[in-house]
Amino acid sequence: MRRARFAIYFALGLFLVTLCTIVLLMVQVAPVRSSAPFMGIVIDPGSRAFTQTPIDSGSSAPVVYLPNRLFRCIDQNQQFRCQATLQDQPLQMTFDHGKDYIYYLENCRATYAGQATNCQPGWGGYMTNRGVLFYYSLNSDLGLTVPQLQAIQQQYWLTNLIGTSAEGLLWIATWAIALIGALLAIGLNWLEDNRFTRIFTSLSSGFVLAVFVRSWLGGLPYALLAQYGIDEATWNLVLPAIQLAVGVLAAILTGLYVSRRTGFAARGATSLMMGFTAASFTWFFVPTFSLMIPGGARLRLFLSSIVGIGTVILLWKNARRSIKIFSSGMSALGAFTMLMLFLLYLSLNLGFAD
């Protein structure tokens, strides 16, 4: 048991260090840190950056991704003028404002070391705090040798590792990190029963139910609310209050339950609330599969009912094992939800996804 505890705490520490490192790297290379009117610039000697053509870096010049933070830009006379230093030579780019949208840049013109080079719109559509930005491609090696291009790749290694696939990679990484966090929460709660794990379970319960209430009630159409005399402004004030009240109530009841301080009424309320929550989560998650088989709607209702009733019975038993199962499951769900929302919010606000 001592080895298991050491292993889980070591894994938790390693996970937190890794998570902090990832967050710091994301902040360091975030597109929103720059005032440039584009996501990035691609040096693409063979016009391959936005295709599926494999790159043979051993026999041809590599594709190089330049982060937008490398550029210093000014907005003047309906034009963006940007400049960066690359291999001790100036890379200058000029764009005209878009007619319909300022960042739909037009007439891209680029020079490197005083020599004009071809500039074309590439890939984009990423939302930032300044709007939707795009990548632009320089279809030339700029007169640089392969070792020089490789040196630039190494200098901006993280940008070149991600390329233009930041959104997809971060989506996969977010799921992986959230799942690992959930597994660690299960392991920690199964091995430990202390104040820290009880507090985390309580907070997880309140947070998960608050998110659930927000997603459920927040999806109600304003036309339906209007039938009951509730306008949009009123609802936007009432919904956060309901969300907060449900979250606080769930946290308090869960804290009492995992601390084994529940009487008949509190245990009943906790069991029913968590049973309804479990059934509701099952109802929302099952549709993806139920649509693929005959009688899927009945299966959806059956599974939701079984999960809900099973949760009520498990919590009502109030046995040591049932409390441990509930605590582990709720902590895992809370860790997963918190990490998912945190990383998605971070990705959106740093300009990696939209």
Image (cartoon, rainbow, N blue to C red):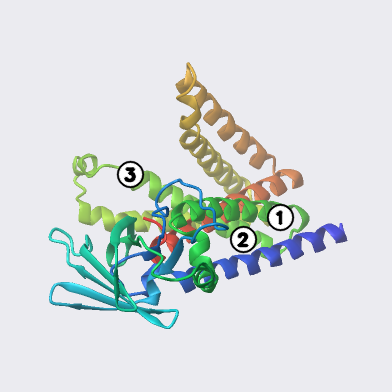
How many neighbours does mark 3 have within 10 angstroms: few (below 14), some (14-19), or many (20 or more)?
few
Distance between mark 3 and mark 2 Cα atoms: 28 Å
- Residue most extreme to the top: 294
Residue 239: horizontal and vertical position, in percent? Answer: 33, 54
How many neighbours does mark 2 have within 10 angstroms: few (below 14), some (14-19), or many (20 or more)?
many
Residue drawn at the location 37% of the way across and 65% of the way down: 40
Residue 231: horizontal and vertical position, in percent? Answer: 19, 50
- Judged from the image, the secondary structure of the residue bearing numbered disc 2 is helix
Residue 191: horizontal and vertical position, in percent? Answer: 78, 55
Can you tell which mark lies on residue 219? 3
Can you tell which mark lies on residue 200? 2
* Quadrant of the frame with the C terminus: bottom left
In the picture shown, does residue 123 fall above or below 78?
Answer: above
Q: Amino acid at mark 2?
A: Phe
Lower sequence index among marks 1 and 2: 1
Q: Nearer the viewer, residue 225 or 43?
A: 43
Distance between mark 1 and mark 2 Cα atoms: 9 Å
Can you tell which mark lies on residue 189? 1
- Judged from the image, the secondary structure of the residue bearing numbered disc 3 is loop
Q: Amino acid at mark 3?
A: Gly
- Judged from the image, the secondary structure of the residue bearing numbered disc 1 is helix
The answer to which quarter of the image holds residue 86 is: bottom left
Residue drawn at the location 23% of the way across and 63% of the way down: 103
The answer to which quarter of the image holds residue 58 is: bottom right
Residue drawn at the location 58% of the way across and 42% of the way down: 271
Lower sequence index among marks 3 and 1: 1
